[in-house]
Amino acid sequence: MTNEPQSSTAAEAREERKPVVLQVVPELDVPGGTERSTVEIAQALSAAGWGSLVASAGGAMLRQIETAGARHVQLPLKGKNPIQIRKNTGRLVELIEAEAVDIIHARSRAPAWSAWHAAQKTGCHFITTFHGAYGTSGALKRRYNAIMTKGELVIANSQFTANHIVHTYPMDQKNLRVICRGVDVSVYTPGAVTQARVIQLAGQWRLPDGKSVIMLPGRLTAWKGHKVLLDALTHLQRDDYVVVFVGDEQGRHEYRKQLERRVEQNGLGHIVRFAGPCRDMPAAYMSADVVVSASTKPEAFGRVIVEAQAMGRPVVAFDHGGAKETILGGETGLLVEPGNVVALAQALEAALDLTAERRKRMAEVAIRHIAENFTLDKMCASTLAVYEEILAAKAPGKR
């Protein structure tokens, strides 16, 4: 006689239980777009009262996961070896069953293979996010990448990425969702940055008074276009500016040396500063008069471009990738032909020569543009809406 009430109570408990989402990434060491998004969504899930788990091989960002209110589970998810993927499948099956995971969200290819197999075995929902356009040289590489299209729903971080997916992989487009990266506009807003923070960076970077600052934020890697910018600077007929490269070299010492040699070859030693990584990017943007994105390959989204606009800074960028979606040409920044150093130099000249009134107007439009389209709140709400959509659908397997 007691079985019925207990069964009913258990059923009600299951109905009332908040869903549990497990995000899987290779590691949490480098604060790139994948890792940042993982932390941000972990925090949004916790704030909404959902269960929030993250599985990875660990790294320097573990503290941020814990601060976000999520629980981290250490698993060796970096490996691409088929044997390792098979072992990780078993580990994820155990985790899904132990934690009653409803959705497993894969953000990278190697863990996605294990996550997909684990979802098949447990009936857990499986979704993916493309954080970029993967290289597609060779049939084997395309097959490896294609795991990211097997999500019941597939998220692309920009329309550029969505177009790449559609044109590269066979998949049902009705399962594709575009959710652009978002900026925390409570942090990335001019009013939140004190003058003292800007002054501190100016001293640290040896920024001279009376000089305009051209800034290229981004890790020191060749495709970010540092050399392109250095070559463009040789076409500027002025010396009223300095250039600051803000970003970690991440062990690329040889590339740093190549840049230093290019600086000397181009006679720019008195102009260029290598600032290294910066812990206060809002203040860094406030220190800049122009922010540059000179990436030689299209950025899948381009977080720097959005952050700079949120801070009211004019942006000069190559007209490809995510920049085409996030910059209002002529209104919030200038878009130039990709790889054209002369055109880049001309755009820099125009940006440096902006009148105070024109600069103010561009800042107003840029700040409003980001607030309406590319906020962190919007990204998180859209992602949780995808989770809710998938939960409203029929369970994919055993559950």
Image: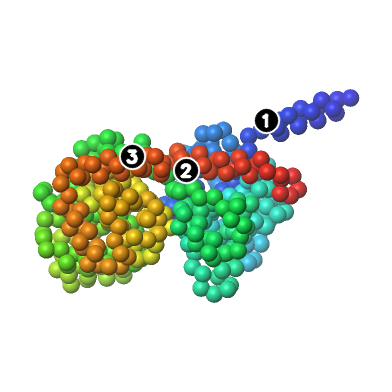
User: Do residues under tags 1 and 2 come within 8 Å of each other at their CB atoms?
Assistant: no
Which is closer to the viewer, label 3 or label 1? 3
- Work out how far the residue at label 3 is from the one at label 1, CA to CA, in angstroms: 39 Å
Q: Amino acid at mark 3?
A: Arg
Residue at x 33%, y 39% (from the top left corner): 368
How crowded pointer 3 is (Cα within 10 Å; few <14, some 14-19, many 20+) is rated as: some
Say which label, 1 or 2, has the lower sequence index: 1
**For this rendering, which residue is in front, 214 or 363?**
363
User: Do residues under tags 2 and 3 come within 8 Å of each other at their CB atoms?
Assistant: no
* Residue matched to label 2: 379
Say which label, 2 or 3, has the lower sequence index: 3
Q: Amino acid at mark 2?
A: Met
Instruction: Using the image, tell me which numbered label, if any, was put on residue 246.
Output: none
**For this rendering, which residue is in front, 357 or 219?**
357
**Residue 263 position within the rendered picture, expressed as x and y whole percent measured from the top left:** 20, 67
Residue at x 30%, y 57% (from the top left corner): 335
Looking at the image, is 174 positioned above or below residue 144? above
Location of residue 72 (image quadrant) = top right
* Residue matched to label 1: 16
Instruction: Using the image, tell me which numbered label, if any, was put on residue 368.
Output: 3
Identify the secondary structure beneath mark 3: helix
**For this rendering, which residue is in front, 179 or 4?**
179
How crowded pointer 1 is (Cα within 10 Å; few <14, some 14-19, many 20+) is rated as: few
**Residue 390 position within the rendered picture, expressed as x and y whole percent measured from the top left:** 63, 44
Residue at x 71%, y 44% (from the top left corner): 394
Which is closer to the viewer, label 1 or label 2? 2
**Residue 239 position within the rendered picture, expressed as x and y whole percent measured from the top left:** 11, 59
Identify the secondary structure beneath mark 1: helix
Q: Amino acid at mark 1?
A: Glu
**For this rendering, which residue is in front, 147 or 328?**
328
Residue at x 57%, y 44% (from the top left corner): 386
Looking at the image, is 340 positioned above or below residue 68? below
